[in-house]
Image (cartoon, coloured by chain):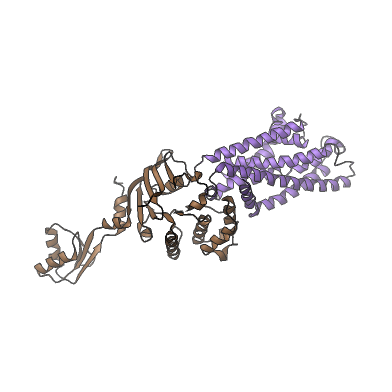
Chain colours: A brown, B purple
Amino acid sequence: MTDAFVEVRSLTKRFGAVTAVDDLTFTVGEGRVVGFLGPNGAGKTTTMRALLGLVTPTSGSATIAGKRYAELRHPTGVVGAVLESTGYHPSRSAIDHLRVLAVTAGLPERRAAETLEDVGLSAYAGRAVSEYSLGMKQRLALAAALLGKPRLLVLDEPANGLDPEGMQWLRGFLRYHAEQGGSVVLSSHVLSEVAQTVDEVVIVARGKLITQSTIAELVSRTEARVRVRSPGADRLAQALSAAGHTVTPAVDEDAFTVVGLGSDQVGHLAAELGVVLHELTPQRSSLESVFMALTADPEPS
Amino acid sequence: MTRLVRAELLKVRTTKLGYWLGLVVAVLAALTVAGTVFGPERDRPGFLSTPEGIRAVFASASAGGTLAMVMGIVAMAGEWRHKTATAVFLAEPRRGRVVAAKVIAQALLGLAYGVLAALVTLLTAVICLNVKNVDYSVTADGVPTVLVGSMLATAIYGVLGVGYGALVRNQIAAIVSGLLWTTVADGLVVTFLPTIGRWTPAGATAALTRAAAGNNRIELLPVWAGALVLSAYGVLFAAIGVRTMVSRDVT
């Protein structure tokens, strides 16, 4: 891993009696694309807002390039953020919305038109934002994040409100940003949404860190499985069960799935038993199931 | 700091409310002049011919104060109503400066409303007083003080609005309670509790514009003291605005 660009250290944030983030520590290296994952209410949004100086930590710290957000000399050139519940004045046009933010950040006003072009909204620049669709608003939020040409993009649940086409476009955009050497932190409550985009994941639940690992490490936690279809399915399943393997019946009557074995081992056993095989398909448990198991609430509800 | 003020003024210019309220200011000033000149003469017949009567007519120039306050409230509370605070504080995390820029921008807008109201008042008053054949001079009887004082008061009401909008984050609640105070409550205090009333924003404004609110003639502060008291309110509310905004969580 490269040097820590984003550093969250023992971050705790309480809202009254509710502990939203609980002693959370993780880092993001420069040039990395990191998925920040956890179920809804895991503290992802609060962590991101603390990183961006919008929420004051109860204790601990969240820094970018070694500094708190408010201490950054040109914050918009370092971080661009697309957060949930970011608003617009309904009657102000998209281009004016961006001009206001550009002037506030001390950036040239022409960045407003340039970033609208970047996100493909130039044709709708003069429209009032209230006429925008949810997907267009998400793009506008991204345009605002890009105003200062930031090295790091922070996106909170960007998939919300985007149609599959929009999501695909966003993936392409983030990949391009990463290829240019930029870093990305994007949160989601669904691993499969970001699995193709990110290099590594930081998984949180109930405000605590569960694990920080690469996608490859996460894949290695999945289990090998073999789907078997055979006219002698019952006999083969019994033999496998007797040998101590977990067998799950499939929907079709003459098939089942066995966990923890390779297809070669199952094939050998079938030959020994003289059972004809119609299908022998190696599978893996899904990443999503690993994610669910990691973030599951230990207390039964 | 200049860029932040520029951004605040750009916010005002890129929405319609400021222009509409400017129109309201002009109409309100004209109606107040006409009402004072042609309405039932205050207290006694011939009131209009007195220096006090002339000042009451020209005090219509302070008609924009309430609307400047509304604009100030909208500038601050509107950032929460439309959830634009997040984007603004990301663009400029030094929040105290953002609020300070709002204070300056709204004082400037208030001043613009004040100048507009003064011009409309002058024009309408000249016409109305001539129609009624009242002898007057715009350079005598303290009329220049009334006009300048009104402009100043209107600018300060813009500042009061920013501070009040920071304190009461709910825009509707802030506007409704703010309007109730300036149009009803403050006038009642000035009328019925004159000893306290002359120290309220309306009392200080009355001192600045030399026009007693209500029918009871109350002992007003001197002009300079009125200016000082109203400015102190402005500073107090601006400080409240900065203070409440600096440490507040934006969620």
Task: Report the residue that reaches farthest toward the top.
Answer: B195
Task: Report the residue that reaches farthest toward the front.
Answer: A3
Where residue A4 sits in the image (x, y, percent)? 39, 49
The residue located at (61%, 40%) in the rendering is B164
Where residue B30 sits in the image (x, y, percent)? 78, 48
Q: How many marks?
A: 0
Relative height, residue B22 to residue B62 (above, below): below
- Please state which of residues A84 and A254 is positioned toward the viewer in this rendering: A84
- Please state which of residues A210 and B83 is positioned toward the viewer in this rendering: A210
Query: In the picture, residue A157 is in which quadrant?
Result: bottom left
Where residue B81 sits in the image (x, y, percent)? 56, 48
Query: In the picture, residue B145 is in which quadrant?
Result: top right
Q: Is residue B250 visible?
A: no
The quadrant of the rendering that contains the N terminus of chain B is: top right
- Please state which of residues B184 and A217 is positioned toward the viewer in this rendering: A217
Where residue B5 sits in the image (x, y, percent)? 63, 47
- Left or right: where B111 falls relative to B89: right
The residue located at (90%, 41%) in the rendering is B135
Q: Is residue A184 visible?
A: yes
- Left or right: where A231 falls relative to A38: left
